[in-house]
Image: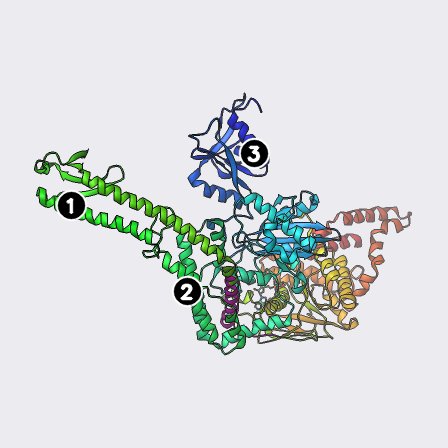
Amino acid sequence: MSTYTPMIQQYLKIKAQYKDCFLFFRLGDFYEMFFEDALAASRELEITLTSRDGGAEERIPMCGIPYHSAENYIKNLVEKGFKVAICEQVEDPKTAKGVVKRDVVQLITPGTVMEGSMLEEKENNFLASISEFPGQTFVITYNDLSTGETSVARVTSGWESVLSELFNQPVKEIVVSPDLPENYQTDLQQRLQITVSYQLECGVDNSFASLTEHIWEDNQLLEGFGRMLNYLQNTQKRSLDHLQPARIIQLQEYMSLDMFSKRNLELTQTILRKGKQGSLLWVLDQTVTAMGARMLKKWLERPLLNKKAIEQRFAVVEAFLEQYFERESIRDALKSVYDLERLSGRVSYGNVNARDLIQVKHSLQKIPVIKQLLSQFKSESVRSLAEGIDDLQELAALLDESIKEDAPLTIKEGGIIKDGFNRTLDDYRDASRNGKKWITELEQREKQETNIKSLKIGYNRVFGYYIEVTRANLHLLPEGKYERKQTLTNAERFITPELKEKESLILEAEEKSVDLEYQLFVELREKVKQFIPDLQALAEKISNLDVLQSFATISEINNYVKPSFNEKREISIEKGRHPVVEKVMKNESFVPNDVKMDEASEVLLITGPNMSGKSTYMRQLALTAIMAQIGCFVPCEKAELPVFDQIFTRIGAADDLVSGQSTFMVEMLEARHAITRATENSLILLDEIGRGTSTYDGMALAQAIIEYVHEHVKAKTLFSTHYHELTSLENTLKSVKNVHVRAEEYNGNVVFLHQIQPGAADESYGIHVAKLAELPDELITRASEILKQLETGQNQATLPEKSEPVHQVAKEPEQQMSFFEVKEQRPSSDKHRSTEEGALVRELRHLNILEMTPLEAMNALYELQKKAKK
Ligand code: ADP
C-alpha cells in the first residue's frame, strides 16, 4: 500500500469500507473507478478501460464517466442489481492541503433508488429485511423509500413460507444478518433473484420512536424494523422524515397463496414472459393514478378473509356501477391527481422542485371535487369514503399563492415565486423592472440626442449593458461621453457611467431576487414537509378509491357479477369464464362453464383430451375466488363461493430450473405443500399429477393423493388427469365426482368443445392432438396401430384392463416390482431363455422413464413386449 500515491491510498481506504459496491470516486469532472471495479464497470457499462500510474510498479486499471452524465450509468448498474457508492470531494480543491478530502455521501442500491427515472411508476420499489428467530419464526419488513411506507410481518411457518411471502413482491434488495444461513441467502439470490445486503446492527434510535411506538414491546418486530432502518441510515446519510410508522401485516388475515400458486396462477406476471401483460392484474387494472395501480397490486397479492371487509368493497363497487355518470366524473377527477406518495417522498428527501409542488397543488385542488362527487352517491358505503378525506386546502392555497404555474425545473435560477408573495422579493423585482424600463427610455433619449436611428442598447454576460452604434454612424457620436468596450465587424459597443450605475442596480436586484427565491422555496419545502403525514393519509384514501372505481369499471366492461359467500363450503358458479383467456381470445368466443361442488363432490376428477381446456377450467375457479376475495366482481352469471383460506396449485410447466430440481421433484414438492398445509377451507388444484414419472408410478401416486385428500384433507380439490382409469374412483370414494371436457370427432379430426360435462371422458384423443400438431403421417399411423393393439388387449400381461379398477394397481406394487426380478426367479436350467430375458431386463433397466412421454413409454413397452414374445 505504501508504494501507492496518496490519492490511490485514499481510494483503497474508502473502497475497503464499501467492498460490495462500485465506488464512484470523484476526480474533478469525472467519477473514476480503479482496480477490480474498473474491470467490472468497463464490462458492465461498455466503457473504455484505461490505466494510470499509481505509484506501484504495475499500472492501475481505471475507467471513468463524466459526473454530469452519471445518472444513466448508475441506473444501468442498479437495474442489474449492483450497488453504487458515490464518493465526493468534500473540501474545496483550491484550499485543500495535500490530497483533497473525499467521502462517500450516498449509496445507491436497488432497494433505495429515489430518482424518478429509475422507478417504475406503477410499481413499488421495496427494500426488505429478514430477521430470524427461534421456532421457525422470521420477521420480514418492507420499505419503499420513494413513498415512505414501511410494514412488518411475522412468518411462523418456516423458510418456505418466507419465500412464498416474498415471491412476486417488488422487492429489489433484501437486508439480512451476515449470520443468515448460507442456503437461505442462496435461495434469495437465485430463486427470487434479489440483491442481498448485510446489516448486523438492529437497534432503533430514539429519534424514530414515533415510527415504532406500537411495536416497541415486540422485540422481534422491533429488531426486524431496526435492521432495515439501520441499513437505510447507513446508505442514505440524509433525512428520512417521510418514513411512515411500520404497519403490521397480520398474515393470518389474508388468504395465503404459496409461491407455486402465485406463479402458476399468473396473478401479477406471466410465467413465460415475466411481464404484466397476460396476467390477472393486466385484466383488472383500470386504475388511473400510479398510487392506485400500486395499491391494486397489493390487494391482489393479499385477498381478504374477512367477509364483512370484502362485502364493504362489493357495496362500493355496486354503487359505482349503479351511478355511472358520477363514477365517470370521479374517474376523470382522479386522472388529475398526481403521485402524492412519491411527491411527498421527494419533499422529504430534498429533491423536490417547483413543478413537483405545482403537481401537488393541482392534485389537491381536485380533492374537494372528488369529495363532492362521493357525497352525491345514494350508497352510504360510498358517502362514507368521503368522510375521512382531509382535502388539505390550506396547503393548496399556500402553493397557489407562492409558486408560479410555469416555474422552471431548476430551483436555483429564480422564476419560481409569484409576485405578491413576498414584499422584499417584490421590491427587488421592482428595482430590476424599473431599471429595465429606465434603460428602454435611455435608448429613446440617446437616439434622439445623437440622431442615430439604429442605435440600440443590448446586454451580454461579459460586458453587461452596452450602447451599440453601427460603424457608418460613429461620426455622429459626441466626443468624451462614450467609452469604447468592444469592436465588432460592423459596429462598436460603448458604455457610459450612467448606464453602468443603473446596470449594477439591476444586476444586484436580480441576484438578490434569485437568492431570495431559492431561500423562499426552501422555506416552502419545509412547510410542505409538515404536511407529509396528511399527504400520505390522503394518498392512501385516493389509492383505495381508485382501485374500487377500477373494479367497477372493469366489471362493467367485462360483465362481471357480484358473488355471494356461504358458510356451507359450497361452490356454485353459473357460466363461469376465465378472466384472462376470454380477453386474450380474439375471434373465437370463450365457452362458459359451470362449477358445482358441495359435500358430495369435494373432489372433481376432470378427464378429457389434452388442450381441451382442463387447466383453464381449474385456474378459472381459483382466479374467480381470488377476484371475489379482493372485493372485485367475478366473470360469470352467478357465483356462490366459500371464503377460501388458502389456494394451492400444481399446474402446468413446473420446471424450477434455478433450484436445479427435476420437473417431477417439483411436482411432488408442490403436491406435498398442498396436502400438508391445506385445510377443509382451502382450494387445491392438481393438474396431471404423476405425468412426470412412469405410467404405473404416476397413476399410483395420483390415486394415492386423491385418496389422501379425500380422507384426510377434505379441501375442495380439482384434479385433472389423463389416467382415464382413475375415473372408477367415483365408485369407491363418496365425495369424488367425475367431470369431463367434451370433445367430438369429426371426419377423423377431433373438435374441442371446451364444455365441462358430468361423467368421465371415454377416450383419449392424444393421437388426434398429435395430428393437429402436424407430426409426420407415418408416425401418426404407427401410433394408431399401437393404440389399436393396446386396446385389443395384446398387452394384458402388463396393462390393466379398462374395466379393472386401477386403484388395485396402486395397492399391489409387488406385482410390478416382480417384473424387475424376473431374472432371479428363472430356473437356472433354461439358460438360453434366461440370457435373452436378462438382456430384456437390462434394456428395461436402462430406459429413462422420467424423461419419456406416455406415448414414448408405450412405444418402448411395445417393443419390449414384441421381443419378449419372440
Ligand atoms: P388442457 O389443460 O386440457 O390441456 P388448456 O386448459 O390448456 O387445456 O386449454 C387449451 C386451450 O384451449 C387454451 O389455451 C384456450 O385457448 C382454449 N380453451 C380452454 N378453455 C376454453 C373455453 N372454455 N372456451 C374457449 N377456449 C378454451
Residue denoted by label 1: 443
Q: Between marks 1 and 2, how big is the CA–CA gap?
A: 46 Å
Residue 713: image location, x then y, percent = 76, 66
Viewer-proximal residue, 294 or 792?
294
* Sequence-earlier tag: 3 or 1: 3
Residue 381: image location, x then y, percent = 54, 74
Q: Amino acid at mark 1?
A: Glu
Viewer-proximal residue, 462 or 613?
462
Mark 2 within 8 Å of ligand 1, using the beta carbon: no
Q: Amino acid at mark 3?
A: Lys
Which residue shows up at 53% across the image and 58% down it? 276
Work out which quarter of the rendered image holds the N terminus and state it: top right
* Sequence-earlier tag: 2 or 3: 3
Q: Quadrant of ligand 1?
A: bottom right
Instruction: Count numbered badges in the picture.
Output: 3
Viewer-proximal residue, 437 or 28?
437
Q: Between marks 3 and 1, how big is the CA–CA gap?
A: 61 Å
Which residue shows up at 48% across the image and 30% down it? 100
Residue denoted by label 2: 365
The image shows residue 112, relative to residue 337, as above or below, that is above
Identify the mark at residue 15; answer none if there is no mark: 3
- The reply to whether callout 1 and callout 2 are in contact (CB within 8 Å) is no
Residue stretch rendered in magenta on the structure: 538-564
Q: Between marks 2 and 3, how big is the CA–CA gap?
A: 49 Å
Q: In the rendered view, does 567 fall on the left or right side of 510?
A: right
Q: Nearer the viewer, mark 2 or mark 3?
A: 2
For the question of whether residue 29 can be seen, the reply is yes
Estimate how packed mark 1 is, as few (under 14), some (14 to 19) or many (20 or more) residues with alpha carbons within 10 Å. some
